[in-house]
Image: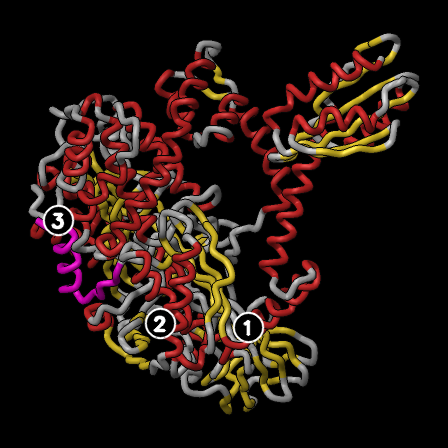
Amino acid sequence: MDVRKEYLKYFESKGHTIVPSAPLVPDDATLLFNNAGMVPFKSIFTGEVPAPKNPRATSCQVCVRAGGKHNDLENVGHTARHHTFFEMLGNFSFGDYFKEDAIAYAWEFITEVLRLPVDKLWVTVHESDDEAEMIWKKYIAADRIKRLGDKDNFWQMGDTGPCGPCSEIFYDQGAEHFNTEEDYLGGDGDRFLEIWNLVFMQYERSSDGTLTPLPKPSIDTGMGLERVVAIKEGALSNYGSSLFMPLIKKVEELIGKEYKYESGASYRVIADHIRTTSFLLAQGVNFSNEGRGYVLRRILRRAIRHGYLLGFREPFMYKIVDTLVELMKDPYDYLETKKESIKEAIELEEARFFKTIESGIELFNKELKNTDKIFSGEVAFKLYDTYGFPLDLTEDMLREKGLRLDTERFVELMEEQRNRAKAAWKGSGDEAVQGDFKALLEEFGENEFVGYELTTHKSKVLALLDENFKRVEALDISQKGWVLLDRTPFYAESGGQVGDTGELKCVAKVLDTKKFYGLNMSQIEVTSSIKVGKNVDAIVDITRSEIAKHHSATHLLHAVLYDVLGEHISQAGSLVEKDRLRFDFSHPKALQHDELAEIETKVNELILRAINQETKVMDIESAKKSGAKAQFGEKYGEKVRVVDFGGRSVEFCGGTHVKNTSEIGSFIITKESGVSAGVRRIEAVCGHAAYKHFCDQRILLKQVEMEVKNHDVLAGIKRLKSTIEELKTEIKEAQKAASTKIEAKEINGVSVIIEEYPAGDIKAKIDELKNQHDSVAAMLFQVKGEKVLIAAGVKGATAKAGDWIKRVAPILGGGGGGRPDFAQAGGKDVSKLPQAKEEAKKYLEEVL
C-alpha cells in the first residue's frame, strides 16, 4: 500500500485541497527548518493572514528536526522511531470542521483504509476534554481511552497565541516484543507507538495565561508516514520498513558486512542521514560553517564517522544517492533532476572530512587515556576547530564510552573564537515581519501588479502603513512608511530580482518594493503629504530597464552553463540588480580560464542573435512538461509565467525581462569564485554597467601603459619582468660574492691573491684588496657565460700589473694590458682557467 497516496486521496475525497510539500527552508525567520506539517499554515492559524477559500487542506510535508528546539539528531540510530528527516501526513481545518469530524475522519482512515486492527488501537485525550472523550466513545471502548495532562495532551505554538487540547492515537505493538518499565500507554517505551496527533485549536492564550475560546476553532493533525508504513509492513522499527531497508542493504553491499539490528546503529544513522543530506542539497541548502549549511555539514559528518566505524576509509555516502532517488523520486521528482549535483557535493564534502577524520580520532583516543569521567573541553574544541568534528559528533563518541564533556570550557573557547570573528559576522539577513497584513488582505485581497506591461500607472492608495507596519490614514513630509496601491507597476523583490524604486509623482520617493503575504507594497519617503484614497501617478525608476537586462542575462547564463559544464548544473541562488548580476550554481570545482571565456562568448552570441523573448502563462503541470526549468524554493501558484528565449532558455520566472536579447548589449564576466563546497558563483555586468566596465578597463590600460612606458603593455611588462629577473640574478651573485672567502698567500713579504671571483665588480674588488694590504699583488678571474674577465692590481711590490696580465691572458685565448698598478683583460676559453691561474702564480714567483 502507498500510504502517502492513500492518505491524500482519502482527505481529497472529504473536500480537502491537496497542498504540495513546502520547502524544508521555511518562510519563517524563527525556524531553521520546516519541522512539522502545520508550519506552512502557521500564519493562517495565528491569524496573520485570512483562511484560504477552501478552509480544508491536506499535505504530506517533508520535515527536518536537527537543530534548535526540535532536535532528534542524538537519538537517530539508537531508537526505532527517531529521524532527522521524516514525512508528516496532515489534515487541517481553518475554522471549518472541528472535533466531531476530525475524530471521525481519523477513525475511518485508520480502520477502513489502513485496516489496522481495532484491538491494537488506543487513544489519549486531555484530562479536561470531556467533549473529545464522548466523541471517541462512539468508536472505541471506554477502557481504551486514557486522560493525560498538559505535558502529553495540550499543544501550543508559543507562550501566547492559538493553543488547545490534543488527542493521540496509539498502536499497540505487543507485550511480547516490548515489556520494559516504560512500555505503558503514555510511557517512553516502544510498545504503544503514537501514530497520529489530533490538535484541537480552540483557545487563544494571552500573556497572563488566560485561555479565551476562539470564535472559529481549527484542526491541525500530524501522522508520521514512517511509523505507519512500518506498522503496515509488520516491522517493529521504522528502519525495518521498505522506506529504509533498501538504503541499509546498499550500505551492506558497499562495506561487505551483514546488517544486524542489535549492532546496526551505524547503518541506521547512515540510512537516515543520507535522506536528510540529499533533500537539503536538492532544495538548495549547501555545506557551510554557519546556519542551515552547518547543520547539513554536521549531519553528513556524523554519518561519515559512523561509516568510519563500519570500516569505510574513503567517500561512500554519495554512492547511496542513486538508491534513495529510486525510492523517493515519484513524489519528489526534483531528486532525480538534482541527482548528479547532490552526488558531487556529497563526495567533495566526504573527501574533505576523510582527510582529517583519522588524525582527529587519533587525538580523541589519545585524550581518552587521560580521561577519567570528564573529557577535556580544550581537546573537544581542537577537534572542532582543527579537524572539523562538530561538537555533537564528539559528544556522540563520548556517549558510547559513558563519558561526559567539559562543556563549560568548550563554550568558553567557542565564545573567544566568536569574539575574534565578530567583525566578519554578517547575520542571517532574515527578519520576522509582523503587521496589519491580515486586515489588508481581508479588506482588499492581493493587489494587482501591472509592471510587466507598464512602468507608469495612475493608481489609488488603498492603505498606508508606518515603519512598524501599522495602519495609518496619512503620512506627512519626511516620514517613511509603506503604501498599498490598487494596481502597481512596481516589481516586488522576488526570485533574486531586487524590488523596484521610483516615485509617486510629487508625493513620495519609492525606496524599495517587497511582498508581504501576497501584498505588493512599496516603501516610501514622503515629499508631500499622502492620504489613504489619494490618486497618484506611480512611476518606476529608469533603472528598471537595466535590471531587466541583467535578469535576462542570468537566464542565458544558466542555459550556457548547462551546455558548457554539463547537466549537473543547478541554480543555487541569484541576485539581479541594475548594475550587476550574481549567479550561484552547483559545480564541484573552480572554472578554468578557457571555460569562462567560452561561457562569456556563448552568452554574447545569444545576445547578438537578437532572440525575441516570449512569455506564456501556463498551468504548472503543463509548464513542467514543456521542459521549463523551475527554481526550487520559489512559490508558484496554479498558473506560472514561463519566459522563453527562442527555446535556448526556458524557465519559470515572475521577473521582468527584455523583449529581445539584443537589448542586453553585452555580457562581461567580472569574477568567478566559490561560495561553499560544491557551489560556484559567477558575477557579471550587462548593458550600461558593461559599458562602464569597459571604460574603466580602458582607463586602467592607459594607466598601465604610462607605468610600463610602452604602448604595447605586454611588451612593456615582459621587459620589466626581464629586468627584474636580471636584478634578482645580480643580487644573488652579489650575495654569493660577498660570502666568497679570498685568502692571501705571502711571497717574500708580498700578499699574493690569485682567485676566482664569482660575481660583482672585479675592478672595485681589486681596489678594495689594495686598500686592505700595504704590499699586494692580486689577480681575479670572473666567468661570464663562455668568457672570462681578468683584473690585476699591484701595490708596494716589484711586479707590474700590465706585464702580469699580458703573460696570463693569452692562455685563455684573449689579451689585454694596463698600467703597472692596474690592468684588465678578457679571455674566451673557460676550460683553460686552471692553467691561467698556475701561470699567474709562476710569474710572481719569478719577479718577486
Magenta highlight range:
1-20
Q: Is residue 79 above or below residue 1?
A: above
Nearest-to-viewer mark from 3 and 2: 2
Identify the disc placed on residue 653.
Answer: 2
Where disc 3 sits, the SS reads helix
Residue 689, disc: 1
Where is residue 321 shown, x and y percent of the image?
23, 43
**CB within 8 Å, label 1 to label 3:** no
| Mark 1 or 3: the one toward you | 1
In the rendered image, is residue 143 in sight?
no
Residue sitting at 22 percent across and 21 percent down? Answer: 263
Answer with mark 1 or mark 3, whichever residue precedes in sequence: 3
Q: Residue at x 87, y 31 (%)?
A: 819
Distance from disc 2 to disc 1, alpha carbons, whole Å, reads: 23 Å
Q: Nearer the viewer, residue 31 or 613?
A: 613
Disc 1 residue type (three-letter) = Ala
Which dot, 2 or 1, sits closer to the camera? 1
Q: Is residue 8 magenta?
A: yes
Give how far across and how far down residue 199 sits, in percent: 30, 51
Q: Which of the 4 image quadrants contains residue 309?
A: top left
Which residue bears the numbered disc 3?
Answer: 110
Instruction: Confirm whether the magenta stretch covers residue 731.
Output: no
